[in-house]
Structures are given as C-alpha cells and as structure tokens.
Image (cartoon, coloured by chain):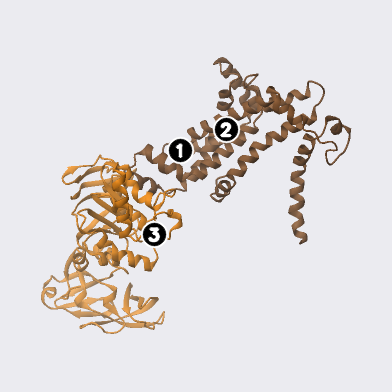
Amino acid sequence: MTLELRNVTKRVGADTHIHETSLRLEPGEFNILLGATNAGKSTLIKLMAGLEKPTSGEIRVDGENVTGLSPQKRNISLVHQFFINYPHMTVFDNIASPLRVAGIPKSEIAGRVEQAADILQLRPMLHRRPDELSGGQQQRCALARAIVKESKAIFLDEPLANLDYKLREELREQLPDLLAGRGTVIVYATSEPTEALLLGGRTALVHEGRIVQFGPTTEIYHNPANQLSATVFSDPPVNLAPVVKRGNRIELAGGHGWTVEGAVAAIPDGAYTVGVRPHFVSPVPVHERTVPIRGVVRITELSGSESVAHFEMGGHVWVSLSPGVHAYKVGEEHEFYMAPEHCFYFGENGDLVIKGDADG
Amino acid sequence: MRPRALIPILYILFLLLPIYWLVAMSFKTTNEILGGFSLFPQEWTFASYRTIFTDPTWYWGYINSIIYVSLNTVISLLAALPAAYAFSRFRFLGDKHLFFWLLTNRMAPAAVFALPFFQLYSAVGLFDTHLAVALAHCLFNIPLAVWILEGFMSGVPKELDETAYVDGYSFPRFFIRIFVPTIKAGIGVAAFFCFMFSWVELLLAKTLTAVEAKPIAAVMTRTASSAGYELGLLAAAGVLTIIPGAIVIWFVRNYIAKGFALGRV
C-alpha cells in the first residue's frame, strides 16, 4: 500500500503546526522523519494515523481518501517514545489485545502472539506484567504489539529515544529485519541524524512544520537541497560562513581562502554561503587537500573517542569533529584544516548552488 | 528504647484515648459509667451490643446508612469518571474555571443546603428515601471524586489512549477495558473518600429522612430521650459507627499512599 499526504495543513488556534505538506510514502523501506524536537514529526505521524484531523488537505491510502477515517478503522500500528503498554495486562495479553479487538479466533491468537514474542525475544516474559520488565523489554513488548497484526502502516515515534545506549544500538540493528518484507509502510521519526543514516531508506527532513527535503537518506545527506537541509541533517550542525568568489578564488573572512577548479570555478562570481560538515574540519590535515584556517577555541568536548572543538573564526563559530583525543586549550588560537572538496556552496536564497568535487 | 521514640508514642496514645474510652464505655453498664472514674469495665456487659443487633430500629439505622452511602459512592464515581476524563484530556472553554468551581462546592457548609434540599425533595416525593440522601451527598462527593480522579488520570500519558485507538479499541471499550483498570488505585481512593464523607455527614442525612431511611446518627439521638441517658448503648453504637470506616481504610491504605505520592489526596 502507499500512504500519501496531499496539501495537508494542521493549525491549532493561531499556531500553524504543519504548513502545506505533500508526501508520498511507499511500503517496504524505512521512511524516516528527521527533525529536532517540536519540528512537527509527531504531528505528522498523528495526522497519518488519524489521531488528529488535518485542517485542510487529504490523506490517501492506496489512492483512497481516508482523511475522515478514525484510527480504529485504518488498520495501523503505533509505537511511542514512552513505553506504552496496558499496565494491568500480562505481556501475552498486551500483544494479543489488537488481535482480540479485531475478533480473531482464539486458536489463532496464541500462535501469532508466540511468534511475535519469539521475534522480539519476549518468550520467557509472556506471563509477566509490563511493570516487571526492563525498559528495553517494555519497548519490545510495544513493538511486538505493533507487528502482531498485519497492519497497513507502522508508525514509530522516536521508539529508541528513551532507551540506554547499548539497548538502543541493539534494537536499532534488529528493527530493519523485523519490519522489512511486511509490505507495510514504515514511518520512523527520529531527532538523530546518525540514526537516520544507520537505518537508511528514505528520509524526510522536517523543520518547523515543513518538509525541507525528501529522498533516499544517503542521497539527501550528500546532496542537501539547501542550507536548512544541511543544517537539519547534521549533528553537530553544519559549519556555515559567508564567502566571496572571485574567479577561481574563494575568500573566507579572516584572510583564509582557497582556489577552486572545474564546475565550482564556473559559477558566477559573488557572495555565497559555504557549508562544511564538522568532520571535514580537523586539527590535523587528514584529507587529501586541505586549507588551513585559524580560530580561537571556545568550547571543547570529548564524546567517546571523538574530539569536538567549537572555535571562533571571523565572527563565526565553527565546529570541528575529529577522531581521537586532541588537546585544545580554550581561549587560544588553533590551526584547523578544512577540506574544500567537501564544501557546499549555497546561494543567497539558501539553495544549494554547487558542492565541492568530492562525494560526501 | 531511645527517648525520642516517646514523643510519637505519647501522641498516638493521646489520639487513641477517646477511642479507647468509647470502647471501654460500650462494655460498661450505665450505672458504672455514671458512677465515677474507672479505667476498665468492672463488670463486662454485652447488653448494649445485644440491644443494637436485636432491635430493628437500631440495626436498620446501620442498614439505612450503608444503603445510602453505597448508593452515593456508586453515583459519585459514575458521574465523576467521565467528568474527570474530560478535565484531564480535553481543553474546552472555561475548563479551569469549572474545575475550580467544582472544588468550591466542597467548601460550602452542608447546613446552607439543608433547607432547599428538604423543600425540594419533599416537593418531588423523594423525602425519606435512601436516594434523597445519596443525591444530596453528591453535592460534595462528586466534586471531590472528580478532583481526585483527574489527578490520577493526568498521571496516565495520553499516548496510552492513542495506542489503544490505533490497536482498534473503540472509546467505550478502551475506557472500560484499559483506562479504568489502569487508574483503579485512583478509583479506590475516590471511593474511599466518598464513602467516608457520606458516612460521617449527619446534618443532611437527618434532615432528609424520617422513618424509612433513618440513618444511624438519627437513631442514636433516641437514647437521650427515652429512659434517661443510656450511655453504654450510645457508646456501643459509636463503636459500630467507626468500624466500617476502619475496614475501608484497611483495604485502601496502599492506594491512599499512592494517592498521596501523586499529590492529589
């Protein structure tokens, strides 16, 4: 089946939660809604699930208008960020509940519940109640309830956000296998760009109630349509600074600059905004061709095996993300090396004009 | 034993003293009660209790009270459950004002309502029925139940409702099969408070009844008029009045602790 939003808007009072949006989701692969908290991901899911009615526009399933149809009649599944299970029922009854409501014969229910429980490794916990399970098990119970019925669409609203790191990784690896090959539309909301990249599929970048860009996940990561798209799909956010292009020379504030060739050199001279992802700015020259830039280090962070430095350069704060541990001195000037091949050049309206020669 | 422990012990003894005195009195003869100071019954007698359990005017007092209290608890909960759900789940015009206004009902003295209720119920033929007292007590019990239940319901994430709808539950089915069991602790607490407040309320209960639905509190006033003061009998009736409350507290004590933890009781 396909799920389609046609010119859907959602307003609550004077606030516009979703600006006019059209989106067509195909079954089989992950459709990721990527955006910050409050970007409108949950609202989009609620609209698709029928939990909220759009102010205008249509929602179509296989071409059929289902805008006014209640969620009960849509045959869908939903997993929330919080571990939502029916607290007074055992895990077995929890998983069985959508089947029981649908009036499926008892003889069939037990087999299907056990099958779902096996997939999610819940077999030994079937007779416990949700409050006797760990967080990961509770969420697996919610997932089992979502996959036990043959629903047309499965909505996952940041399902891993409340899990600890190890469990999140484990479950994230299992999810694609779990949901693939069901012929259902899978919608997965997340606020983490890395999660979107790991899950693959297609991604819709959501920002302030709009879909900024929609397409295959890796493609839109490598080819952001505009500045906003590059910002949303980057963590830490993409580094931006105004540049001036003159001939084959790109001038960055603070006397930095580099020469460009080929297609990039061919764009008209003038003012552009350059964007470069933090991992292409490193304290040592690791990329093939690099341009040294200098900035005063303001904040440093160590996250696991990666070093993050926020530095100020010509009035702009840039972020460098590099593997390994680097000793930065806060308040002192450091040299960083950026890779101009990995730059995006955005025009004055924010749209991508061209990107550097290399992919990524 | 550390001397600090003495303070709570003394306090508890102080609180229990009148109850002990009541229990001791109920086993004494009237002569002994009037005779002077005695810490224990000198001559144990169960005559007072025997009177209460054999005389229909006495035990019907209890039965009447239990009938209207139970009726009130059921009506209050049935009305408060949907109301509390609306307050906890929906935003509507004036919802906060309405919620506060409900609470202020709780603060009005029952005496204010005694006269209008008496006249109204007499006019519609409800006077001296269990239903009259049960309905009158709804005046303060429904707001209380709404207040308590709203607190428990707001503790249940709205996502539970959404999950149930997506799973295929219709609203009534979700409410009865999922939501009510989820907040059963709150329902227990609300039922307890409705029961207690209705049980101890005397003024409306006495004003709205004559013979058929006469509550125990009204029966107890009899002892003062007939053959002098039958203090032993009165004390025994008092003990029996405390017992239902004590039993209910025993059953819902864990729920009430939970209610306190949620900050709504």
Alpha carbons under labels 1 and 3: distance apart: 46 Å
- The answer to whether residue B179 shows anywhere in this view is yes
Q: Real-space Cα distance between discs 3 and 2?
A: 49 Å
Q: Which color was chain B given?
A: brown
Q: Are marks 1 and 3 in contact (CB under 8 Å)?
A: no
Res B195 label: none
Structural crowding at the residue carrying mark 1, measured as other residues with C-alpha within 10 Å and reported as few (<14), some (14–19) or many (≥20): some
Which residue occupies the foreground of this view, A290 or A312? A290
Identify the amino acid type marked 2. Phe
Residue A173 image offset from top left, x and y in percent: 29, 66
Q: Would residue A52 be seen by someone viewing this image from the given angle? A: no
Q: Quadrant of the N terminus of chain B?
A: bottom right
Left or right of B191 on screen, residue A159: left
Q: For the residue marked with disc 1, what is the amino acid? A: Asp
* Quarter occupied by residue A83: bottom left
Above or below: residue B148 compared with residue A288: above
Disc 2 on helix, strand or loop? helix
Give the chain letter at badge 2. Answer: B
In the picture, the disc for residue B95 is 1
Circle 3 crowding by C-alpha within 10 Å: few under 14, some 14–19, many from 20: few
- Tell if the residue under mark 3 belongs to the same chain as the one under mark 2: no
Residue at the spot of label 2:
B140
Mark nearest the camera among 1 and 3 is 3
- Above or below for B64 versus A310: above
Q: Quick one: which chain is orange?
A: A
Q: Is residue B109 above or below residue A48?
A: above
Q: Is residue B129 above or below residue B35?
A: above
Q: Secondary structure at mark 1?
A: helix
Observer-side mark, 1 or 2, equals: 2
Q: CA distance from mark 1 to mark 2?
A: 19 Å
| Residue behind mark 3 | A124
